[in-house]
Image (cartoon, helix red, strand yellow):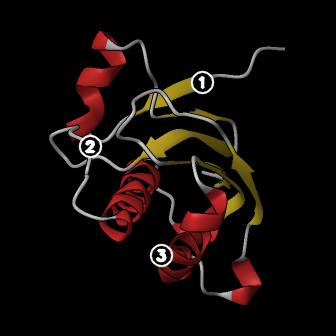
């Protein structure tokens, strides 16, 4: 049995689908699988002004992808974050995470992973998610 899949991309990320062979998210049945979102602006340029701004941008991109799929952070059931400096980033990450995931009744399962690098030297944090969002 085949599950129908749909690629999801906010308008400002649509070029990534063609140029980078990258799906910001894929809907399969009742689930939306969001690819890792990094700290870049709507022009797809890395945000390097501060760690807070970088992480805020990564969450903004996550929310934009969820919104394009008709979801919200309350629909997220799993969150995975990748950190190039877990100890140095965690307090700031937690502060930004609470802005989007503050309802204790809808907190997602969360795993934070330390990594040596992401796919660009200016990317410090990457956030992926799975949302349960029946149509």
Residue topped by disc 2? 46
Q: Residue at x 22, y 37 (%)?
A: 44
21 vs 48, nearest the viewer? 48
In what element is the residue under mark 3?
helix
Give me the C-alpha separation between circle 3 and circle 1: 31 Å
Q: Residue at x 27, y 28 (%)?
A: 14
Question: Vertical placement of 37 versus 132: above or below?
Answer: above
How far across and how far down the image is residue 84, in percent?
57, 47
Give me the C-alpha separation between circle 3 and circle 2: 17 Å
On screen, residue 7 versus residue 49, left or right, reads: right
How far across and how far down the image is residue 112, in percent?
72, 56
On screen, residue 92 versus residue 80, left or right, reads: left
Mark with earlier residue (3, 1): 1
In what element is the residue under mark 2?
loop
Q: Residue at x 47, y 53 (%)?
A: 66
Residue topped by disc 3? 96
Q: Residue at x 52, y 33 (%)?
A: 118
Q: Quadrant of residue 24?
A: top left
Question: Vertical placement of 26 versus 113: above or below?
Answer: above
Mark with earlier residue (3, 2): 2
On screen, residue 16 versus residue 65, left or right, reads: left
In what element is the residue under mark 1?
strand
Q: Find out whether the residues at labels 1 and 2 contact each other: C-beta distance under 8 Å.
A: no
Residue topped by disc 1? 5
How far across and how far down the image is residue 62, in percent?
45, 54
């Amino acid at each position: 049995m085949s599950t129908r899949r749909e690629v999801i991309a906010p308008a400002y990320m649509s070029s990534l689908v063609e140029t980078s062979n990258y799906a910001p998210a894929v809907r399969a049945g009742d689930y939306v699988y969001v690819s890792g979102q990094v700290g870049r602006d709507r022009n797809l340029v890395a945000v390097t002004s501060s760690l807070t701004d970088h992480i805020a941008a990564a969450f903004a991109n996550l929310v934009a992808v969820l919104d394009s799929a008709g979801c919200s952070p309350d629909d997220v059931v799993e969150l995975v974050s990748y950190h190039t400096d877990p100890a140095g980033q965690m307090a700031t990450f937690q502060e930004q995470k609470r802005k989007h995931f503050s309802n204790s009744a809808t907190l997602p399962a969360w795993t934070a992973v330390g990594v040596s690098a992401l796919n660009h030297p200016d990317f410090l944090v990457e956030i992926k998610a799975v949302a349960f969002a029946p149509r």
